[in-house]
Structure formats: C-alpha cells, structure tokens
C-alpha cells in the first residue's frame, strides 16, 4: 500500500476546498485499485460534488438549516457553531474510498473531491491518502 499526507489551509471562515488534483496526482500511473482519502478531524468532512456552479452556497444553506450555528449544542466550547461542526461528520463523512482505473480516479464529469470545513477554530487540515493496488 502506498500512502502520503499533506496539509490544506481552510482559513478563518467556513470553507469548501477542492483537493481533487492532489488525489489525482497521487494515483497517477498507479494502475487499478482503490484510493482512500481521509480527513482525520472531528469537525469537517469530505464530499464528492460539483464545484464552481453555486453548489457550494446551496450546501452551506442546507447545512445551516440542518445544523444551525446559533443553536445551543451540548458540545459548546469554541466559536459560535463549533457544536454544529462536531455533528457535521455524521452527515458528511471524513473518509472517501474511490476506484482507480488505469491510474485515474474514477469520477463523474462534474465530480470533485472537496473538504467541507465549517470550523473556523482550525484553519489547517491534514489529509491522508492511501492507494491499495488490485490483485
């Protein structure tokens, strides 16, 4: 199994960050197998989604509806909305496993791999990638 890790700056406001290019570079030329993308944090997740078309704002609107930042959470330390950020990974998982075919991640035409990070208390995120070749 081949592994690597890298960091991404998500900043001081809720962010959606495209990491597709990192994942594609990691598996380039590797043949067939599976790539695991892991975000080892308790307040962010990973999603496959179209980016740059307004989907980001739509996602934030839905998340605010489902997990309002001003709601009173039992887990309440940190900035406003920190409790909501801790609930997010139950809906947007912090891991993805994707097929790799001929050294390319198998994604749909508009699919991108994105970090969904509502937590302004942690502006740097770690990503762990693992490639498991077939056979």
Image (cartoon, rainbow, N blue to C red):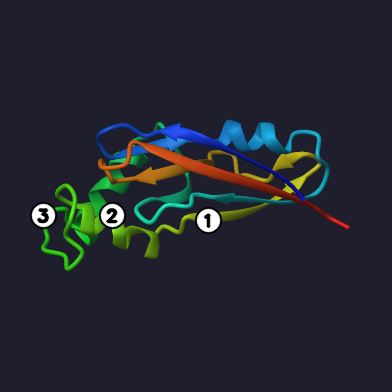
The numbered mark at residue 113 is none
Check the image and report above or below for 100 versus 77. Answer: above
Specify few, some or many for label 2: CA neighbours under 10 Å numbering under 14, 14-19, or 20 or more: many
Count the marks. 3
Q: Are marks 1 and 2 in contact (CB under 8 Å)?
A: no
Pointer 1 residue: 95
Q: Quadrant of the C terminus?
A: bottom right
Q: Residue furthest bottom?
A: 74
Helix, strand or loop for disc 3 = loop
Image-quadrant location for residue 115: top left
Q: Residue furthest right?
A: 135
CA gap between label 2 and label 3 equals: 12 Å
Specify few, some or many for label 1: CA neighbours under 10 Å numbering under 14, 14-19, or 20 or more: some
Q: Of marks 1 and 3, which one's residue comes earlier in the chain? A: 3
Observer-nearest of 83 and 27: 83
Q: Residue at x 25, y 41 (%)?
A: 120
CA gap between label 1 and label 3 equals: 27 Å
Q: Of marks 2 and 3, which one's residue comes earlier in the chain? A: 3
Pointer 2 residue: 85
Q: Residue furthest front?
A: 77
Q: Residue at x 46, y 33 (%)?
A: 8
Pointer 3 residue: 70
Helix, strand or loop for disc 2 = helix
Check the image and report above or below for 38 versus 113. Answer: below
Give the image location of residue 134, x and y in percent. Answer: 83, 55
């Amino acid at each position: 199994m081949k592994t690597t890790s890298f960091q991404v700056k998500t900043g001081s406001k809720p962010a959606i960050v495209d990491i597709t290019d990192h994942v594609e570079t990691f598996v380039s030329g590797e043949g067939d197998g599976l790539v695991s993308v892991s975000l080892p944090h308790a307040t962010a997740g990973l999603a496959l989604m179209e980016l740059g078309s307004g989907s980001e704002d739509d996602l934030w609107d839905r998340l605010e509806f489902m997990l309002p930042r001003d709601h009173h959470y039992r887990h309440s330390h940190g900035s406003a909305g920190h409790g909501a950020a801790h609930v997010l990974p139950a809906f947007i998982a912090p891991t993805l496993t994707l097929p790799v075919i001929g050294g390319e991640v198998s994604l749909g035409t508009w699919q991108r791999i994105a970090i969904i990070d509502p937590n302004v208390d942690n502006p740097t995120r770690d990503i762990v990638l693992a490639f498991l070749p077939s056979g």
